Amino acid sequence: MRKENAGKSIATAEVIIAGGRGIKCQDDLAMLEELAGLLGGQIASSRPLVDNGWLTHDKQIGQSGATVKPKLILNVAISGSVQYQLGMCGAGCIASVNQTGEAPIFDISHFGAVSDYRKLIPALIAEIKSRKYSTAPQN
């Protein structure tokens, strides 16, 4: 994650990449952190990742965590419990990735992808890097 966002409250973040119960292992959070860094955002989570000890409580979104209103939130492997939805429903744009098409998170998402995040997120990171770091056209 970008150092300028380290330690900042997720409540004030303009971009949030949030992981949920469907994240397979703690190491997978590194790809979410990389994506958040590329977008100038912060990583956050639903309660299960905090309960697992993978992230600290200050990164938890929901009724028992923080209420956030970012311009963009990307929910990754989050089913979308009512408690979680209450914490992030004020976001400007809600995008979600979940392997289950019937996940409740899709009911409030502006954009959704029924996909394995382990394939989609690395592809998204690669695309952003290719656009961000490609050489500018010469005049």
Image (cartoon, helix red, strand yellow):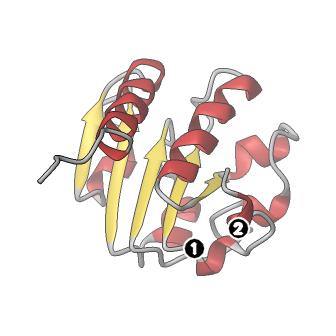
- Amino acid at circle 1: Ala
Is 11 on the left-hand or right-hand side of 40? right
For residue 101, what is the image quadrant? top left
Alpha carbon separation for disc pair 1 and 2: 12 Å
Residue drawn at x 35%, y 41% is 128
- Which residue is pictured at 71% across the width and 22% down the height? 25
Observer-nearest residue: 25 or 52? 25
Residue 9 in the image: x percent, y percent? 72, 75
- Mark 2 surroundings: few (<14), some (14-19) or many (≥20) residues within 10 A: few
**Badge count:** 2
Task: Check disc 2 and give the amino acid type.
Answer: Glu
- Residue drawn at x 43%, y 31% is 121
View extreme (left): residue = 139
Left or right of 66? Residue 136 is: left
For mark 1, give the secondary structure. Answer: loop
- Name the side, left or right, on which 42 lies relative to 103: right
Q: Residue at label 1?
A: 13
The residue at 85%/54% (across/down) is 56
Which quadrant: the C terminus?
A: bottom left
- Tell me the element at label 2: helix
Residue that label 2 marks: 4
- Dividing the picture into quarters, in which one does residue 54 lie? top right
Q: Mark 1, mark 2: which one is toward the viewer?
A: 2
Q: Earlier in the sequence, mark 1 or mark 2?
A: 2
Query: Is residue 49 or residue 133 the one in the foreground?
Result: 133
Vertical position of residue 25 compared to residue 60: above or below:
above
Foreground residue among 12 and 83: 12
- Image x and y of residue 15, in percent: 48, 65
Residue 70 place in picture, x, y as percent: 47, 74
